[in-house]
Image: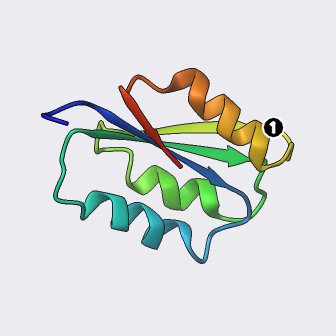
Amino acid sequence: MENNLVSIIMPCYQAENYVAQAIESVIAQTYLNWELIVVDDGSFDGSREIIEVFLSDKRIKYIGLDKNTGVANARNVGLEHAKGRYISF
């Protein structure tokens, strides 16, 4: 696998209780050449504010959708923005 970029797509909906822990688990990986694309699927809780704390890490990207359209659509939106040779959900 050498040092290929891995794109990790994380759909998020109403996840303020869990999203920080999920993002921290990606950051803690020993493989460092990754990008995390968090797709907020129309959450109206505090998910966005929590995610924004992590955006100083340039490997983490945030995409906010206006309304909840479901996990499949959120994954597809993430795929449209992924730049990695490998994709993970």
Residue found at the very far left of the displayed protein: 2
> In screen coordinates, is 34 left or right of 30?
right
| Occupied quadrant, residue 28 | bottom left
Q: Position of residue 21 (x, y in %)?
A: 44, 73
Q: Amino acid at mark 1?
A: Asp
- The total of numbered circles placed on residues is 1
Which of the pair 9/64 is nearer the observer?
Answer: 9
Which of the pair 2/36 is nearer the observer?
Answer: 2
Q: Is residue 57 above or below residue 21?
A: above
Task: Report the residue marked by disc 1.
Answer: 66
Which residue is located at x 60 percent, y 22 percent? Answer: 80
Q: Is residue 70 above or below residue 15?
A: above
> In screen coordinates, is 87 left or right of 72?
left
| Occupied quadrant, residue 17 | bottom right
Task: Name the image colouring.
Answer: rainbow
Q: Position of residue 37 (x, y in %)?
A: 49, 40
Q: Is residue 26 above or below residue 83?
A: below
Which residue is located at x 58 percent, y 29 percent? Answer: 79
Which of the pair 30/43 is nearer the observer?
Answer: 30
Residue found at the very far front of the displayed protein: 1
Identify the image quadrant of the N terminus: top left
Which residue is located at x 69 percent, y 32 percent? Answer: 76
User: Disc 1 on helix, strand or loop?
Assistant: loop
| Occupied quadrant, residue 86 | top left
Which residue is located at x 78 percent, y 48 percent? Answer: 42
